[in-house]
Image (cartoon, grey):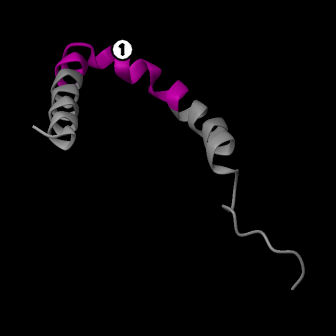
Amino acid sequence: MNSRTWILMAVSLGIIVLFFVLREHWAHALGIAPYILLLACPLMHLFHGGHGGHDHRDGA
């Protein structure tokens, strides 16, 4: 098997495990959802460069 097959198998297994973990602990997952949303903005600024993307131009 090539590496792409192994990656696909690992991702599929991860999605299945995530589904079962979330199914059992849905109330806890929803409890941290607002904090994940609040954390998303600083992480976007850190990794993406902030508001407006990378197309900043001076002048008209």
Query: For the residue labelled by badge 1, is the local secondary structure a helix, a strand or a loop?
Result: helix
- Residue 51: image quadrant is bottom right
Task: Left or right? Give the position of 38 relative to 55.
Answer: left
Task: Left or right? Give the position of 6 relative to 47.
Answer: left
Which of 8/60 is in front? Answer: 8
Which of 43/30 is in front? Answer: 43
Residue found at the far left of this picture: 1
Task: Left or right? Give the position of 56 relative to 31.
Answer: right
Residue in view at x 27 percent, y 13 percent:
25
Residue in view at x 24 percent, y 24 percent:
18
- Residue 5: image quadrant is top left
Residue found at the far right of this picture: 59
Q: Quadrant of the N terminus?
A: top left
Extent of the magenta region: 19-36
How packed mark 1 is, by other alpha carbons closer than 10 Å (few <14, some 14-19, many 20 or more), is few
Q: Position of residue 8 (x, y in %)?
A: 18, 39
Q: Position of residue 50 (x, y in %)?
A: 70, 51
Membership of 8 in magenta stretch: no
Which of 2/28 is in front? Answer: 2
The three-letter code of the residue at mark 1 reads His
Residue found at the far front of this picture: 2
Membership of 22 in magenta stretch: yes
Q: Position of residue 10 (x, y in %)?
A: 20, 29
Task: Left or right? Give the position of 13 relative to 58.
Answer: left
Residue 24 lies, with reference to residue 40, above or below; the image says: above
Residue in view at x 69 percent, y 51 percent:
49
Residue in view at x 27 percent, y 19 percent:
26
Report the residue marked by disc 1. 28
Q: Main secondary structure of the magenta part?
A: helix
Q: Quadrant of the C terminus?
A: bottom right
